Amino acid sequence: MIENFLAGSAALFGDPFTIGIFVFGVVGGMLFGAIPGVSMLTLAAILLPFTASLEPAQGVMLFAVIYCTGTYGGAITAILFNIPGSAENAPTAFDGYPMTQKGQSGKAVGAAVLCSAIGGIASALVMMAATEPLANWAIRNIGPPEIFALVFFGLVVASSVGARTIWKGWMSVLIGLLIATIGQDPVGGINRYNFGMTDLAAGIAFIPAVLGFFAVSEIFVQAEKKASGKYQAPKVSMTFPSFIELWMHKIAVLRSILVGFFCGILPGIGATLAAFMSYGEAVRWSKNPEEFGKGKLEGVISAETANNAATGAAMIPLLALGLPGGALTAMMVAVFQMHDLQPGPLVFMLSPDLIWIVFAAMFYANLSILIIGVLETKTILNLLKIPFQFLAPLILMLATTGAYIGRGLVLDVMVMFLAGIIGYLLRRSGFSIPAIVLGLILGKIGEQNFAQGMQMVHYDLGTYLSRPICAILIAAGVITLASNIYRAFTSIKTKA
Amino acid sequence: MRNIIGTAALCAAMMAAGSAYAFECKRGEASFDKPGGFPERALTMIVPYGPAGGSGQVAAAMAEAVTELTGIPINRDHKPGGSGTVGMTAYMAAPADGYNVLEHIDDASSAHALDSSMPNPADDLIPLVVSQVTFSQVYIRTNETRFSDWPSFVEWVKAQNGKATIANVSKEGSMERITMGFITDASGMKIQQISFDKGAPRYGALLGGQVDALFEQPGDVRNFLDADQFKPILTIFDERPAAFADTPTHREVGMDFDPLLRFRGFYVHADAPVDRVEWLKWAFQRGYCEDSYQAFNESKFMTVIDSYRDTNGAKDLIARSIEQYREVYKAMGLDVK
């Protein structure tokens, strides 16, 4: 493995043009990842035709690098302004933005930089060591029934994130699930709650909803404070997390790598679910779950480690089996095909050089996140010094552009503002915005996999629970749910 | 070794077929005067699906070919959702000035067959070219030990009493669900259809043994065929394509129904200026002949049968499809409007 890695590194850095492509991918991925609406997918779609004129290894490597750095890029705006650049950075905002409000922006951004790099590098190393056996294990053992069990488990944990009471937490999750049912159902294609509007048949897009719930509702909250004279500008903090602080979170980092890797390896799941599941796991294992959503460093660490850990893992089914895990890896299939190559078992036999250049590039791209992240962070943090009256319109403009640009639908802008108003009102009443967003993302994935899973087990619960992974995850979810309810009742009795 | 020989034979058959079609289409005019300077800026192509899927890829390949031919850039505007209805609605609302074109698949025809208030791609739009026409097949894993061909598969499925599974895109009224209905009726077997809207989980389900078979078009699973991981056991087409000479057709195994084809094409508003429409027809039909597009179609198994339909050919194909879908929907008891 080391010999192959060194050969891949030599090929990567032995040619100035290849280095140029690598640097372009690193910087481009970060920039496009950071701007809401124009994600790394936008950049990838623009670049796709141009990859035909590149060497196959250069083209595939460019997309792999964009995938790594684009996944990290959205964390900065999520932490500083409550605007997740991409869906996989949404859980980063749950605690990252409250940390900014508490004057700990440097700590949050520093943790995001470091943990994105750690997650990505760890994942790249596992990818290099065991791509083929891991891919084969995953497709044989994880199907829709298991993915639904995973989602059920995630939803149970979601209810305890950020709400004033567990009941409001559950209500928040249910609101998210309700929103997720809008549009065509994922199995029969039947329209639901679209009220005859064609655009709603496609459902509520995730990015406009997240921008509304997070960025727009936050502007309303801050504007209210400004109007009532209670507004305090967030303090700009340049203090990075100390080594001891990070060391104290070593278990969270390790757990997030495992969760991120596990989610990333499943075809069609990828980095977004990884970040949400990892955040949920952090809450579940915490002795103080009520602190999440209010500015806990572990929240940022869990989300950012996991989403980057998923990038290397997502390459495993792509390269070993030809199964892309998401839109960006699907575009990578197109890059392969442009050069008369097919990802899958044959590519390991026919183009080992290409594979190792890509592996090496992903490793160095994650390392670049660390270097560039540390260098740029202090400059970026100064954005917080912009006065609110200038910052708010800027954020609204960015958010509106981000909501519209994804599908080019005015409906998405309306959804964003509606979500902003609803989010503002719900926050005042003690409901949890992170739980709503978790319900929304997990609801879509969960419903589809539930329907497929039930069809696979012929609607027989016994057969469903005879699958070991399903049984373990469902049992863990039920125990967690029972424990949450017990704690809620105990808390009521204590107060009485 | 068997795999390599098989793949080589497949490629040779495809290339032969592809070359024949490319030769045929290059007999068209090599240039076409711009009517009144049109187009003097970039065209916009609305694509009702995401950039990574089959439609996204064919849109990218055709845009590249037309740009190579004419020098006119084409911006692709992806509007996914609602089984193509979101993109179609957006397109119908766009100015009918010839600068906006639409990519769409046979779903537009089936949607109109079910609900005539939806646009008819042959009447409410003008087909510029249909550039991909393909058939479906049923696949099993190559290393499958429970069955090895269509007769043994049917026998095995019947023995499972409805517990056998097949992965496809089985949305209500879809080409896949209707064709599977034809197959199960004709063969007397009962099989659970599992709907996967994305390709990767669908193919992974077969590779990993989560389902017993897969219903798909050959271009979408080409890498699995090349890697000898999937094996076709039934072709749903009237005759055996040369590239799949060893696979029986549905008619050969005793099924008597007209196959529904998957097709992708490009359209313009019916009320766009006539001279501009003529230029667009030339650009897209000739774009089909460009080497880059032909190479793309070959890579997608789209030269195994004749993938090309000009405007009139496309209108015929669409009209027949609509008629076919409407009859089937009525027979299924669906509310045909």
Image: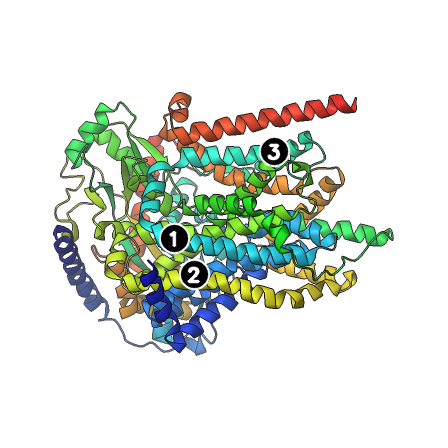
Disc 1 residue crowd, few under 14, some 14–19, many 20+, Cα 10 Å: many
Which of the two residues, B215 or A410, is positioned nearer the viewer here? B215
| Outermost front residue | A244
Which of the two residues, B24 or A318, is positioned nearer the viewer here? A318
Q: Could you tell me the amino acid type at mark 3?
A: Leu
The location of residue A354, given as percent across then percent down, is 32, 64
Q: Which residue is mark 3?
A: A174
Q: Is residue A200 above or below residue A454?
A: below
The local secondary structure at tag 1 comes to: helix
How far is disc 2 from disc 1 in space, using C-alphas? 10 Å
The N terminus of chain A, quarter of image: bottom left
Q: Residue at x 22, y 71 (%)?
A: B27
Question: Would residue B48 be visible to someone looking at this image?
Answer: no
How far is disc 3 from disc 1 in space, using C-alphas? 37 Å
**Subunit under mark 1:** A
Quick one: label 3 or label 1, which is nearer the N terminus? Answer: 1
Of marks 3 and 2, the one in the foreground = 2
Disc 2 residue crowd, few under 14, some 14–19, many 20+, Cα 10 Å: many
Marks 3,2: beta carbons within 8 A: no
Q: Which residue is mark 2?
A: A362
Q: Which residue is mark 1?
A: A127
Q: Could you tell me the amino acid type at mark 1?
A: Met
Query: In the rendered image, which quarter is residue A379 located in?
Result: bottom right
Q: Could you tell me the amino acid type at mark 2?
A: Met
**Subunit under mark 3:** A
Marks 2,1: beta carbons within 8 A: yes
